[in-house]
Amino acid sequence: MRAIVILTVFLTSLLLLSCDSKPTLQKYFVENSEKNNFVVLDISPSILNVDKAKLSAEQKAALASFDKMNILAFKLDEKNKETYEAESQKVAQIMKGKDYQQLMKVGSGKDAASISFVGDEDNINEFVVFAKRKENGFAVVRILGDDMNPNNIMTMLSVLREANIDTAQLAPLKDLIK
């Protein structure tokens, strides 16, 4: 009986210690997906509407490495400026975590954006774009995939130029972009 109690206490302690409570973008998306100030979109590669027969082998490989895109946008208005600042700071803190490696950061006074990634340079699991605009709000875009690399991203840009993008999937964002 005593062995069972000790084993139960040990397993419970191990379970509690293994729980990771650090903030992540995925947790942030889940926690805020139902809140009024936020717009959430999950976009599949089908948004691109490309003729795969016309793509090169390199373009096909780049497209295959892309799984989906998650967008979480905060729509700023006169009533939620304090909430905007707090939520923007939360995202900035998450992006400073050791999992996110910043590639680029640009900004000019009221507008700012950064591009980061998760993984290593040859095997990227997630690209993250965090953009803020004082008049509109902010958006976090997670581009998820398997074995993505910088070459795939550059190749995807060429695919985007040829794509007939299905803008209906982006309709919820139209009020956010002015």
Image (cartoon, rainbow, N blue to C red):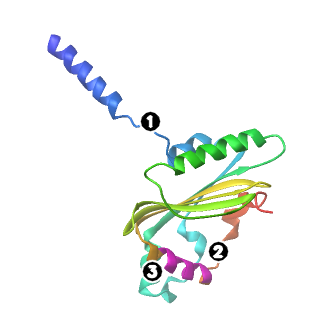
Badge 2: how crowded within 10 Å, few (<14), some, or many (20+)? some
Q: Secondary structure at mark 2?
A: loop
- Give the mark nearer the N terminus: 3 vs 1: 1
State how far apart marks 3 and 1 are (Cα): 38 Å
Q: Is residue 134 left or right of residue 139?
A: right
Q: Amino acid at mark 2?
A: Ile
Bin the neighbour count of mark 3 within 10 Å (Cα to Cα): few under 14, some 14-19, many 20 and up.
some
Residue 1 visible? The answer is no
Percent across and percent down for residue 158 are: 55, 82
Residue drawn at (30%, 24%), measured in percent from left and top?
Answer: 13
Quadrant of the rendered image containing residue 17: top left
Q: Where is 133 relative to 52, above or below?
A: above
Question: Is there any visible trace of residue 97 in the rendered image?
Answer: yes
**Circle 1/circle 2 CB separation < 8 Å:** no
- Which mark is first along the chain, 3 or 2? 3
- Magenta stretch: includes residue 160: yes
Q: Residues within 10 Å of mark 1 (few under 14, many from 20)?
A: few
Q: Residue at position x 44%, y 64% from top?
A: 145
Q: Please, is residue 14 above or below residue 170 in the view?
A: above
Alpha-carbon span between mark 2 and mark 3: 17 Å
Q: Is residue 137 above or below residue 22?
A: below
As drawn, the label of residue 165 is 2
Q: Helix, strand or loop at disc 1?
A: loop
| Residue 83 placement (x, y as % from top left) | 72, 39
Looking at the image, residue 85 sits to the left or right of residue 175; the answer is left
Magenta extent: 153-161
Quickly name the residue at label 3: 60
Query: Circle 1 is placed at which residue position?
Result: 21
Q: Is residue 3 magenta?
A: no
